[in-house]
Image (cartoon, rainbow, N blue to C red):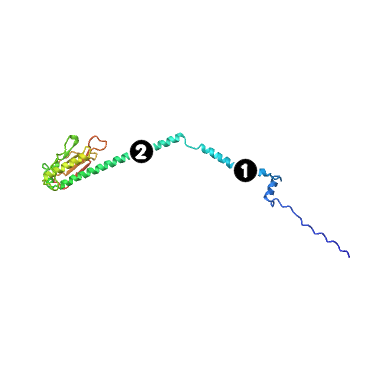
Amino acid sequence: MRLSSPLPLPLPSRSLPSSSALPCSASRMRSHGGSRAPSGSRSQRRSHPKSGARFRSYAGAGSSLHAGFTLVEVLVALFVVALGIAGAAALQTLAVRAGRDAARLSDGTRLTRSLAERMRANPRALALPDDANPYLTLDIDPGAGASPPAAATPCYADADCDADALARFDLAEIAAALADGFAGGRIRVCRDAAPPDAAGLPAWDCDGAAGAPLVIKVGWRMHGDTRTGAPLVVLPVAGAAS
């Protein structure tokens, strides 16, 4: 019995992969016509970004060399700075002058109150008639050549002074303090009920009317003035006889 040879099995068919299934390198070769780029061109392509970065850095360095300010801008900035410094210096000068005037006004007020307290501490002299009251004789005007009262007998705690001597001692000390602390200082004690003038300033003149309050007027020469102006401090004395 003769055996027949087995039939050949069909071979599996191999289908070529599509272009979408090809690797990235194969598709890149196909897009370039099937030719693979040499290794030298790949190195050149890899060096392109670096060369571009170098080019951009050189371009940026060249543009920074031309950055800066013009001469007109510098001059304008210097002018603005100088203007600010000049304004600050002027404000500082005004502030110093205002502080000095305020301190002088405070000293003048204390001097006036000191005289008022001395007058109230001497009630016998304060109760005298106007023509016999020694305090009403105080009228120091440097511009008119009025001289301060002469030095009197010192009347301290252990001194035996009457009302008139104590009043004259008070006037001498007040006049000395005015001459030492105030340029062109002027002081006057009188009876005055006159209102201020049109500018709102008191006057040195006193009306001397009966029943008018007894007031102390003090003034001095301000900074920049050539003479003593209107009284800067006017203080009525409480408890004086009318």
> In screen coordinates, is 9 left or right of 201?
right
Q: Position of residue 8 (x, y in %)?
A: 82, 59
**Closest to the observer, 186 or 171:** 171
Q: Residues within 10 Å of mark 1 (few under 14, many from 20)?
A: few
Q: Nearer the viewer, mark 2 or mark 1?
A: 1
Q: In which quarter of the image is the C terminus?
A: top left
Q: Quadrant of the N terminus?
A: bottom right
**Closest to the observer, 43 or 2:** 43
Q: Where is residue 105 in the image (x, y as percent from the top left)?
A: 24, 42
Three-letter residue code for mark 1: Ser
Note whether residue 81 is visible.
yes
Disc 1 secondary structure class: helix
Residue ranking furthest to the right: 1
Q: Contact, CB < 8 Å: mark 2 with mark 1? A: no
Q: Residue at x 53, y 39 (%)?
A: 61
**Closest to the observer, 219 or 193:** 219
Q: Residues within 10 Å of mark 2 (few under 14, many from 20)?
A: few
Up-down relation of residue 115 to residue 66 (above or below): below
**Closest to the observer, 33 or 236:** 33
Rounded to the nearest angstrom, the CA distance separating label 2 from label 1 is: 62 Å
**Which residue is denoted by mark 2 in the rendering?**
87
Three-letter residue code for mark 2: Gly
> In screen coordinates, is 75 left or right of 92?
right
Q: Which residue is drawn at 19% across and 45% down?
A: 114
Of label 2 and label 1, which has the lower sequence position? Answer: 1
Q: Where is residue 11 in the image (x, y as percent from the top left)?
A: 78, 57
**Which residue is denoted by mark 1 in the rendering?**
47
Identify the disc placed on residue 119: none
Res 175 quadrant in image = top left
Q: Position of residue 88 (x, y in %)?
A: 35, 39
Note whether residue 210 is visible.
no
